[in-house]
Image (cartoon, helix red, strand yellow):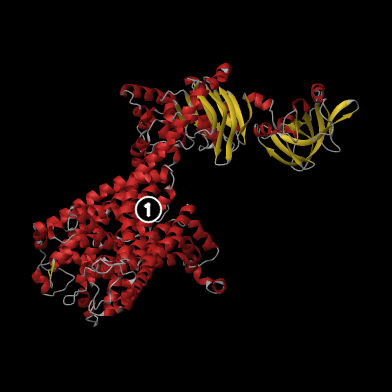
Amino acid sequence: MVDAAFEQPRIAQPARRPRRASLHYALKRKSTAAFLMTLPLILLIAALVLYPALYSIHLATLNKSMQKFVGFGNFTFLFKRETFWMVVKQSCIFAITAVIFKALIGFIVAHFVHNIPAKGQRKWRGMLLVPWVIPPAMSTLAWLWLFDPSYSAFNYTLSFFGIGPIPWLGDTFWARFSVILVNVWYGAPFFMIMYLASLKSVPDQLYEAAAIDGANWWQRIWYVTLPMMRNIIAITTLFSLIVTFANFDIVRILTSGGPLDTTHLFATWAFQVGIQSSDIPLGASVSLFMVPILAVAAIFILRDVSKRGNES
Amino acid sequence: MSTLAIDKAGPTRKIKYGSISRDRAWALRWSYFFLVLFAIFSLVPPFYMLITSLKSSAEISAATNPWWVFHPTLSNYVELLTSNQFLRFFWNSTIVSVVVVIVTMLISIPAAFALARMKFWGSATLATGVFLTYLIPDSLLFIPLFKMLAVVQDLTGITLLNRWYVLLFVYPTLTVPFCTWIMIGYFASIPKELDEAAIIDGASWLQTLTRIFIPVALPGLIAATIFAFTVSWAQFLYPLVFTTSIDQLVLPVGITTTLIKGDVFNWGQIMTGALLGAAPPLIIYAFLMDYYIAGLTAGATKG
Amino acid sequence: MAEVSLRKVVKRYDDVEAVRGIDLDIADHEFVVLVGPSGCGKSTTLRMIAGLEDISDGDIMIGGDVVNDVPPKDRDIAMVFQNYALYPHMTVAENMSFGLRLKRYPKAEIKSRITEAARMLDITDLIDRKPKQLSGGQRQRVAMGRAIVRNPKVFLFDEPLSNLDAKLRVQMRIEIKKVHQKVRTTTVYVTHDQVEAMTLADRVVVMNKGRIEQIGTPNELYHNPATRFVAGFIGSPAMNFVPCRLEDANERLHIRLTDRLAFPLPGPRAARYQSVSRNEPLLLGIRPEHITEARPHPEPGVEPFQAMLDVTEPMGMETLVYFTLEATQICGRVSPNAGARDAAPLRMAIDLNNMHLLNETTGLVI
């Protein structure tokens, strides 16, 4: 045994060089395999996400027939148009108001669901998530019908209380109210689900300790629940901000931007300008204005998500 | 805070005795009260869809109580389900969604496995990139994609625009990043010893993936599949931009563009169509709710 | 069946050396335990033998072949992991047969091997269950079964018992020993628990900071530790170390512990330490069982002294007593009838025939 052990290395020595090379080769092969496995993903992202994103910057510098380079021409043109500033304003009103209400309602509903006995929670959660599950284009049609000027089910109901008739989609204020309402209806369940999952992960001992320390209901939320959920609230809010800001379906189906372009968002206006009026460069310029807000939100999300990753 | 604390130590305390269970009961009652309100708010539109879909045109225009159906009829359903055009929409939506789900899984699973387990140069950056891609909305890309496809069509002579199959190329940009992201998370949660045991048992990387990782991460796989399907099924902007001929449309676009003829809204049929269009995701949700919710919440954690 | 040899094996992570040149020969059928504190490189060494980590330098041989660049599946080894690493979606039988199925063994052969291993481990009734339905001890058996059915050249165990509770650990320890007696496969076993190491091993390898401190049978390590680390690591409660000096008085060699406490060394010990410098700072290493209550007729070399006890810990068959000498806390083991009480004086005796003398600076046993 001992002899063999001393003999071995010497015998093995000459054979060692090529073997080292083969290990090196194997390692290289492993990372090659890994690269090949991610290649379709990389190609997809590069060709159908990154390239179009850059291409849209290029498009934004062309004239309507896309034959002449106009530099910032499209942007200066936009800055001079009143509709553009209205779209900016409405996009911000829409996104901020809708996100705030979604977050608030989601938080409150999540608390109520969390409050009731555990065995009933599934049923309620199931019902409350339905708006998120229906394709928004389909559910917005139902809202359109609910808002219908002549047969509005809402106005019918309100008339019993002596209110109305309300021009839900015909008047600027009410049209803005309506698109936000539908967006809140659609998006609040997502917040509810995220908050509920996060509420469930707060250990009960913390509440018990707070209760023993004499914290009341409101103090428990303020000093225990909110700090524990801060990260998930931030992620959900920022994520929803992106999605809401870039919303298309609801406004397109409900108002198509009307009345008088007052409910247009970047997405719907870009669609109208770029596709319906065939001014692709101008449409591209309009949608590019979403980038700064999306980028800021994305950076913060990324920061919070990796923080969350480190915690767990 | 401090004033509150002092208050509590003072006279309010005497109310506390023996009232904890009563407080609880009231809190519970209030919870149920508000939950009922929110549930009504949530379920009004789908309920209204259902009511309207069961009404005849005559009943709709008679302006009776809109919340109730007095002469229920299935004529709207019969009409749509025997209409070749509507069935065509349904078929287009089905084939697009199913193929996109398959393509998504074929791209996401190997990529997620490589990113979760086979560390290579740039893999961490790529994982972050995947997440960022997921945050890029469709409304930012539809114009350049439209122009790009037009250019490709001109160069190659292959008709892409106004064909349902063009959606097979663009939908994966919406599904693949998120599915990859959550699969990375699910794969990363599998203990490292499990693949080491498989390696020692003699499994290759591919065998480790197919015989260990995929079965073990099956719940994640189901969640990702549901996500890919519902996103494909519900997508509205891309088909609206890329397809216009009636026989190429998918459900959401088909219903909104063909059932609304000028100013004539045939609400009974529109609601029936919308309800039928909402049915597949709702049915999946009803049966696989836990997977659906797991997929929804998984996106907020680092993979 | 095969012997395993390591030649100057080194593992570097970036600029940290986790394993710093290990030489080890494991004979065929031998049960060797690598033991040491966490981070000593024992697990890394095992994983290099398994082929889960590539080696930075040196050679590893299994059955006489250098396997440095051989992938794990071709090394003909089986490994049992700390958290069992059972495939959660497979039944016990499927878990055990996975490796054989990958190698396309005939069905009948697989079945007979599983049946035999299951009988040996007493898990025949569990064969169709999923890991989730098993207790910790049962999972451990399945993990061992998975290794046994492969009939490999070498078994590798990576802290297999540390997820079990104390009682089950003792039981599984015996189980592992029985299995080894039956299959006689060369085994390398990693643990941080010195009791496990002592009870299981033919030979124990004590590792510290990426190096081997000492290799030997359990008894050799216990009675003749080579270094302060081994002396302190093996045995529970741990060996006492008391700063001391040698001095000559009344023509006998004495060991002086404090200004007021010195003992004459018994003959053989005095002879052994005669050449040690009288000014060298030294450590007296003495196990607790060699510090007992004073008895009426002591053997030569057993020296009485008076101690003021701090704390006593009755263990039933004995009582552990703690007292301080200068700043050093010392543990002794006395009979439960010796009358030891907290904060009370007790007449003690130290058995210098079993003492160790260590160089304080090098940590080596003299």
Q: Amino acid at mark 1?
A: Val
Q: Is residue B5 above or below residue A82?
A: above
Residue ID at (44%, 62%): A300
Please state if C212 lies on the left or on the right of B153 as rendered: right
Name the residue furthest front.
Answer: A68
**Depth check, front residue: C147 or A214:** C147
Dot 1: what SS?
Answer: helix
Residue that label 1 marks: B130
**Depth check, front residue: C99 or C44:** C44
Chain designation of label 1:
B
Q: Quadrant of residue B89?
A: bottom left
Name the residue furthest right.
Answer: C250
Please state if B248 lies on the left or on the right of A87 as rendered: left
Q: Is residue C36 above or below residue A294?
A: above
Residue B95 percent coordinates (x, y) = 19, 51
Q: Is residue B85 above or below residue A87?
A: above
Name the residue furthest bottom.
Answer: A162
Residue A42 percent coordinates (x, y) = 35, 49
**Depth check, front residue: C353 or B124:** B124
Residue C144 percent coordinates (x, y) = 45, 29
Residue B150 percent coordinates (x, y) = 22, 58
- Evaluate whether residue B298 shows in this view: no
